[in-house]
Amino acid sequence: MAIKKQYLKSKPVCKVTFTVPAEEAKKVAVVGDFNNWKANKASSLTKQKNGNFKGTLELPKEGTFEFKYIIDGNYVNEPEADRFQWNDFAGGENAVLEL
């Protein structure tokens, strides 16, 4: 799994590209407090020919966001996240993205 951040000079946003190797998966989405933890068309990652799922979101600069991937209905953390934070509601740790 990987996260790539691209800060835009023209807008106060960061383009964040999420890449998830999940060759056997049918659906992968990224959800977090930036989209009310809802898997929808905008949060769905697209399957690539190499078996990875990939997608880019524009998120506000200077923000901190908790997130997870949903891989075929299972919540999975990003091992390369900036850090991890306990979430009482989820009863576990969430990956954290710091922009």
Image (cartoon, helix red, strand yellow):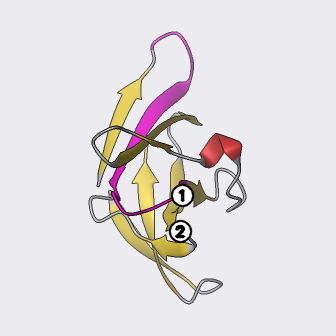
Find the magenta span and give its range: 9-29
**Mark 2 and mark 1 residues within 8 Å of each other at the beta carbon:** yes
Instruction: Using a 10 Å C-alpha cutoff, classify the residue at mark 2 as few (fewer than 14 neighbours), some (14 to 19) or many (20 or more).
Output: few
List the residue tagged with mark 2: 72
| Residue most extreme to the top | 10
Q: Is residue 37 above or below residue 20?
A: below
Q: Position of residue 73 (x, y in %)?
A: 58, 73
Q: Residue placed at 40% from the left, 69% from the top?
A: 77
Q: Position of residue 78 (x, y in %)?
A: 36, 63
Q: Residue placed at 51% from the left, 52% from the top?
A: 64
Q: Quadrant of residue 31?
A: bottom right
Task: Say which of 22 and 77 sits in front.
Answer: 22
Instruction: Using a 10 Å C-alpha cutoff, classify the residue at mark 1 as few (fewer than 14 neighbours), some (14 to 19) or many (20 or more).
Output: some
Which dot marks residue 27?
1
Q: Is residue 16 above or below residue 1?
A: above
Q: Residue placed at 61% from the left, 47% from the top?
A: 43
Secondary structure of residue under mark 1: loop
Give the amino acid type for the residue marked by disc 2 in the picture: Asp
